[in-house]
Image (cartoon, rainbow, N blue to C red):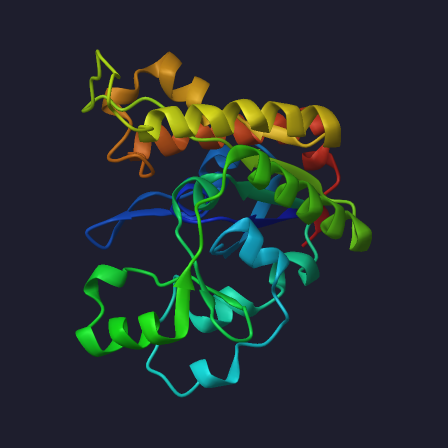
């Protein structure tokens, strides 16, 4: 039995599809190995999941968390201090690296007013008043990325990954279908999330052309199958949605020959 190592560097979108999806503490989708077993593959996948704050924060990682953060109470994963400042994406050996545009589309970062490091204040709305005041005193908000900035960052990330190793690189796009949101007149309306996602998805095509990375076209997969029954919210998929996207990942890896190059476990 051979095994392929996949570094899934993204958030709930890549985790749910490739590693596992849990609902109310129960595993309802068991990741890429469920697809490999169903297809009779003579190999398994070892999936290493790492969260990503945003592409600009990834590029600024120094390897250690700022010292003044170590004295504060900080949430555990998914966005612990280690997850935000460890260089795992660039140092973990893998046959396949899977990235996503989700963080760049949706995450708002802060930057320290003095040493300029980035911080992702996960679930800021649930922070106590003292912690939010501390954040305001020491950090300033960073503007959301636009598609061009995101693609430039992702290209730099791809270059850095390829300097140390030559894995196959896949990037998840996002489904722009919002079955619960129907806009018929955009006059006076700012950019919607669906519009923003479409802009990033289109920009990702250009990145694929210039770098040779493969796109996991979540948008097309869900559109073809009927997004209303496969999406829980803009990011979260149902078990059936995870299966469809994961089957596409396996198909891409098969075309790339990645499944024929796995190490013997």
Residue 27, position as x, y percentages in the image: 30, 48
* Residue 32 vertical position relative to residue 78 in the rendered view, above or below: above
Q: Residue at x 64, y 48 (%)?
A: 3
Residue 110, position as x, y percentages in the image: 42, 62
* Residue 56 vertical position relative to residue 13 in the rendered view, above or below: below
Q: Residue at x 70, y 36 (%)?
A: 258
> From the image, which quarter does the C terminus lie in?
bottom right
Residue 137, position as x, y percentages in the image: 34, 75
139, 154: nearer the viewer: 139
95, 139: nearer the viewer: 139
- Residue that lies at the very extreme toward the bottom in this rendered image: 71
154, 188: nearer the viewer: 188
Q: Could you tell whether 245 is left or right of 238 in the image?
A: right
187, 103: nearer the viewer: 187
Residue 105, position as x, y percentages in the image: 43, 39
- Residue that lies at the very extreme toward the front in this rendered image: 188
Residue 46 appears anywhere in the view:
no
Which quadrant of the structure image shows residue 148? top right
């Amino acid at each position: 039995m051979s095994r392929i190592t996949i570094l899934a560097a993204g958030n709930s979108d890549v985790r749910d599809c490739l590693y596992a999806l849990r609902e109310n503490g129960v595993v309802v989708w068991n990741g890429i190995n469920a697809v490999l077993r169903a297809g009779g593959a003579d190999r398994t996948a070892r999936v290493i999941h790492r969260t990503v704050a945003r592409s600009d924060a990834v590029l600024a990682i120094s390897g250690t968390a700022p010292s003044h953060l170590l004295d504060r109470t900080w949430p555990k994963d998914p966005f612990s201090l280690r997850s935000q400042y460890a260089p795992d994406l660039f140092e973990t050996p893998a046959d396949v690296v899977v990235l996503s545009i989700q963080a760049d589309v949706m995450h708002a970062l802060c930057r320290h007013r003095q040493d300029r490091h980035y911080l992702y204040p996960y679930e800021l709305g649930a922070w106590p008043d003292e912690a939010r005041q501390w954040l305001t005193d020491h950090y300033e908000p960073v503007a959301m990325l636009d598609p061009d900035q995101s693609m430039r960052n992702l290209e730099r990330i791809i270059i850095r990954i390829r300097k140390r190793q030559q894995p196959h690189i896949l990037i998840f796009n996002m489904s722009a279908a919002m079955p619960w949101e129907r806009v018929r007149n955009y006059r006076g309306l700012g950019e919607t999330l669906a519009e923003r996602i479409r802009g990033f998805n289109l920009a990702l095509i250009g990145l694929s052309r210039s770098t040779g990375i493969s796109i996991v076209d979540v948008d097309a997969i869900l559109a073809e199958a009927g997004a209303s029954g496969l999406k829980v919210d803009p990011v979260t998929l149902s078990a059936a949605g995870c299966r469809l996207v994961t089957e596409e990942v396996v198909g891409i890896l098969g075309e790339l020959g990645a499944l024929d190059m796995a190490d013997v476990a």
